[in-house]
């Protein structure tokens, strides 16, 4: 029986004084509930949001909904939230402005660009322009790559002006995938030309921080995990590996270095509560690497309170702690982690290792630092893209890989969310900020330069860690998870003949996320 998203009727818990474990689960079960065990006739609890409209999911409520949801019965349609909230974005919808001059002006009325000696005015071409780059179903990559080549050559100002004028006319952050890709990459290229990448990135980060709240974060995360396995894929795989590695230990400590706001842990808490032996004590130390002003602290405080409440409901002795640090500076204070010899330690790294600069040996140093804590198991999840080394060798090559990667991401979002989803817009803007980071900011300060699984494996092996294969039970749980989503998602295992154990999440046969397990 798979065991991810083991569903709890919280309406029943409200009427009982303590949690009654499900006797069908034991200490070896991992985190999924098989679709075959669900009843299509049972109605969902009235105290939950009606996120899941499919017949086979009517009685399902994911465990983490309890501490992410408010207790009132709010049936807000998230797909229309873009009409209810005002989101910051540095562009306005395109009105076919024919000329934009960069020195001492604003780019689409928001981002101030510094003075420059070159006058890159976006004006219509006066001479013959070859429109062959507009041919085909996907015009944005053609124009963007041509623009990147022109910028790299740095000897054809007219060509750059023509291409960027065309992008400005055709792009829109509210259009189809090509229009969105053109819009966000144009912003990054414009910042690169004017040496304004750091300034643009800070402006976007400040705007994101201003709208960051527990409520908006909750809605975005829940909706993203409802419609796409992009994050839940790693959650299921890592939770299964951690449960197997720490089974039988009375005291557990998980150091969570991730960017998913603890949405991984409610299902693990429930699995611990339903073990056949004594329920272990769990300490969860969350290392937050993205510290944007004070809003993230407020969000984590609320998450911690709800996690502790959920653990009490599950009957799991639990303690929550948050550590804030900037991994780029490798300033992780080990004393704040409070490592204890009588606890079995697991380290969970989800989309976080790439935030450390790839320059020098910073990433290798962090891996060695974590290895030195002597964990029983270390789980690593990273997105599968080569956004580090190709940028350092050749801008056009790196730009092409960046374009390929984000196009896959935008297409997956487009096919997963409704057209007017406000949550999708938030995710797209976060991606736009990442594009600015990659294309126009100092590479030594970048937090977005991902590496391929093959490169991470060499780093982890070099740090004294050995790979561990996912068990067949965990792989079955992941497959069961993917069946909950639309067609296009699949899983593949790395071939074992080259010692490259791990599993990939695929979107239309393209690897997008890599999950792996390691031990000293």
Image: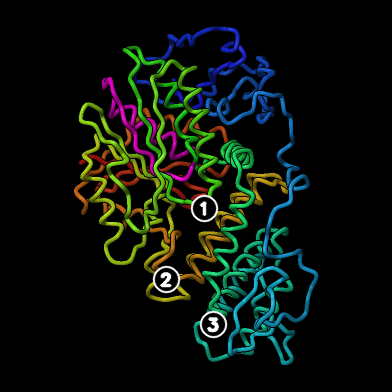
Q: Counting residues from the N terminus, which is met first, the one under dot 1 or under dot 2?
A: 1
The quarter holding residue 485 reads top right
Residue 286 in view (yes/no):
yes
Residues at circles 2 and 3 in contact by the CB criterion of under 8 Å: no
Q: What residue sits right under mark 3 in the picture?
A: 151
Region in magenta: 232-260
Dot 3 falls on a residue whose secondary structure is helix
**274 up-or-down from 82: above or below:** above
From the top left corner, tell me how far across and down residue 506 is, in percent: 48, 47
Q: What is the crowding at mark 1: few (fewer than 14 residues within 10 Å), some, or many (at least 20)?
A: some
Q: What residue sits right under mark 1 in the picture?
A: 292
Dot 2 falls on a residue whose secondary structure is helix
Q: Which mark is residue 190?
A: none
**392 up-or-down from 119: above or below:** above
Q: Which mark is residue 391?
A: 2
Foreground mark, 3 or 1? 1
Is residue 236 or residue 477 the one in the foreground? 236
Residue 171, magenta (yes or no): no
Q: Looking at the rendering, in which quadrant would you find the C terminus?
A: top left
Q: Extreme right residue here?
A: 95
Dot 1 falls on a residue whose secondary structure is loop
Picture residue at 31% right of the left edge, 12% below the top: 277
């Amino acid at each position: 029986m798979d065991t991810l998203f083991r569903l709890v009727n919280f309406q029943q818990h409200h009427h009982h004084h303590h949690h009654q474990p499900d006797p069908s689960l034991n200490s070896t079960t991992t985190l999924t509930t098989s679709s075959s065990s669900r009843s299509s006739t049972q109605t969902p609890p009235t105290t939950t949001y009606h996120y899941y409209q499919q017949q086979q999911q009517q009685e399902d409520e994911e465990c983490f909904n309890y501490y992410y949801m408010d207790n009132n019965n709010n049936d807000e349609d998230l797909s229309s939230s873009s009409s209810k909230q005002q989101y910051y974005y540095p562009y306005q919808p395109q009105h076919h402005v024919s000329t934009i001059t960069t020195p001492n002006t604003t780019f689409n009325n928001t981002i101030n660009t510094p003075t420059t000696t070159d006058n890159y005015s976006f004006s219509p071409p006066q001479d013959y322009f070859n429109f062959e780059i507009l041919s085909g179903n996907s015009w944005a990559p053609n124009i963007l790559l041509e623009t990147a080549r022109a910028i790299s050559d740095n000897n054809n100002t007219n060509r750059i002006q023509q291409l960027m004028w065309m992008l400005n006319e055709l792009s829109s952050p509210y259009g189809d995938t090509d229009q969105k890709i053109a819009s966000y990459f144009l912003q990054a290229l414009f910042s690169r030309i004017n040496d304004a990448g750091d300034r643009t990135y800070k402006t976007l980060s400040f705007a994101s921080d201003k709208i960051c709240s527990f409520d908006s974060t909750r809605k975005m995360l829940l909706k993203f995990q409802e419609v796409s396995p992009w994050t839940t894929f790693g959650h299921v795989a890592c939770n299964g590996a951690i449960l197997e590695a720490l089974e039988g230990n009375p005291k557990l400590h998980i150091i969570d270095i991730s960017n998913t706001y603890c949405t991984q842990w409610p299902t693990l808490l429930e699995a611990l509560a339903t073990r056949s032996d004594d329920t272990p004590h769990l300490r969860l130390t969350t290392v937050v690497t993205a510290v944007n002003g004070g809003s993230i602290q407020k969000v984590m405080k609320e998450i911690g309170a709800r996690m502790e409440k959920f653990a009490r409901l599950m009957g799991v002795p639990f303690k929550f702690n948050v550590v804030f640090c900037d991994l780029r500076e490798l300033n992780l204070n080990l004393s704040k982690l409070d490592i204890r010899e009588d606890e079995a330690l697991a380290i969970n790294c989800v989309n976080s290792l790439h935030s450390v600069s790839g320059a020098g040996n910073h990433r290798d140093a962090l891996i060695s630092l974590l290895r030195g804590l002597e964990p029983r198991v270390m789980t690593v999840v990273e997105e599968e893209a080569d956004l580090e080394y190709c940028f350092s060798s050749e801008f056009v090559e790196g730009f092409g890989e960046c374009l390929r990667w984000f196009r896959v991401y935008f297409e997956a979002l487009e096919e997963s969310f409704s057209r007017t989803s406000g949550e999708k817009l938030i995710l797209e803007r976060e991606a736009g900020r990442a594009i600015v980071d990659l294309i126009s900011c100092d590479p030594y300060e970048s937090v977005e330069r991902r590496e391929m699984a093959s490169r991470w494996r060499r780093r982890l092996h070099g740090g004294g860690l050995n790979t561990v294969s996912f068990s067949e039970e965990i792989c079955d749980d992941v497959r069961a998870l993917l069946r909950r989503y639309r067609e296009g998602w699949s899983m593949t295992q790395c071939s074992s003949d080259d010692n490259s154990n791990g599993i990939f999440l695929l979107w239309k046969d393209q690897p997008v996320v890599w999950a792996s397990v390691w031990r000293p």
